Amino acid sequence: MLDFITRIFNRESTASKNIAKERLRLVLVHDRASVSPQLLQTLKEDLIRVISNYMVIDEEALEVNLENSENQVALIANIPIKSMKRNVNAV
Amino acid sequence: MGEVIVVTSGKGGVGKTTTTANLGTGLAQLGYKVALVDADIGLRNLDVVLGLENRIVYDITDVTGGHCRLRQALIKDKRYEGLFLLPAAQTKDKTAVSPDQMKALCEDLSQEFDYVIIDCPAGIEQGFRNAIAGAHRAIVVTTPEVSAVRDADRIIGLLEAAELRDPKLIINRVRHKMVAAGDMMSIDDIIDILAVDLLGVVPEDEMVIITTNRGEAVIQDDRSRSGMAFRNIVRRITGEQVPLLPLEEGGLFSKLRRLMGFK
Ligand SMILES: Nc1ncnc2c1ncn2[C@@H]1O[C@H](COP(=O)(O)OP(=O)(O)OP(=O)(O)O)[C@@H](O)[C@H]1O
Ligand SMILES: [Mg+2]
């Protein structure tokens, strides 16, 4: 309820153009990612390369996805680790 | 060799045909030789917007199909010496022309004309692919609405994939009072989101409808605000640096540095 009231009085964030802008921003994250299906694949390969410097991961089981939550899009990566490398120097 | 420019948008009804007619008329007023190509096959429009609908004998598919010569199909405007229209076919569909044929056609036209402006159909299907096939440059038209800007973003991606880089944006039907009240996305909002260069801003204006009713372009009207906006866009296309007028930005601060000439 309080949230509702503050929203009514907070013109800055409820001005309809701000709602339009925010919705556009979210929808374009998805649109742009799906215009190039290669994007997630390339990202996956880059992730594997970087992470493999530190640990042994299960490349087959690795999952990377864009997910929608309330008002943001998140990159969710699920990366099963098989083992840690012993000789990685702490930076 | 002339420049081939495609006017496109993704979403329908945002002002591609209006823009094409006005830019063509404006460039012809400046003395350039201009060919306007209606690539909206099956939904011929540019002829009526220009008031040339009674003079059509041949259309674009007659040219690509070899039934007539390009010269025969071009309709000469009565008011402006250098202005010509190549009409779309009304009774065929978009597959009646191929991208390769369009490319060849644009090549031929650009030998004779300073500017070739192609009115693209809405959508991202073959009609779109035909329209962009022979283009050197692209103008993307949008309105300040979520769906139109979203489609513009998609089109910009597809243009890039087709190696038509650096498209320029026209924001049409802007209502400055609504922008000032926070109820319409501003020029800056849209430019921020799309990250392209702005070619111009055209206000919502009754005169567009009134002049279109008469088969005239609003750019011929010296006093209308939209006509003035189109005149500025024409000058930018010819390479002149014309800053956004207050009437274009609605008195609000706008990113002048993103505003570029066409060349
Ligand atoms: N700045 C403006 N102010 C008022 N009306 C406008 C403006 N621009 C365009 N219109 C009107 O909007 C309608 C659609 O414009 P137009 O036909 O140019 O769009 P389009 O993008 O070519 O549509 P389509 O996708 O169907 O080809 C027309 O009736 C036109 O007169
Ligand atoms: Mg049209």
Image (spheres, coloured by chain):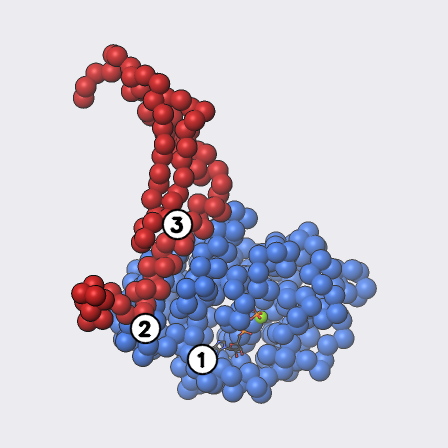
Residue on which the image places disc 3: A29
Element type at mark 2: loop
> The chain shown in blue is which?
B
In the image, what residue type sits under mark 3?
Val
Question: Can residue B243 be seen?
Answer: no
Residue at 68% x, 51% y is B100
The picture quadrant where one finds residue A26 is bottom left
Residue B106, how many percent across, how many down? Answer: 64, 58
Q: Is mark 2 within 8 Å of ligand 1?
A: no
The CA span between labels 3 and 2 is 23 Å
Q: Colour of chain A?
A: red
Dot in front, 2 or 1: 2
Q: Secondary structure at mark 3?
A: helix
* Quadrant of the frame with the N terminus of chain B: bottom right
Q: Residue at x 35, y 74 (%)?
A: B248
* Residue B112 locus on image (x, y percent): 64, 63
* Chain for disc number 1: B
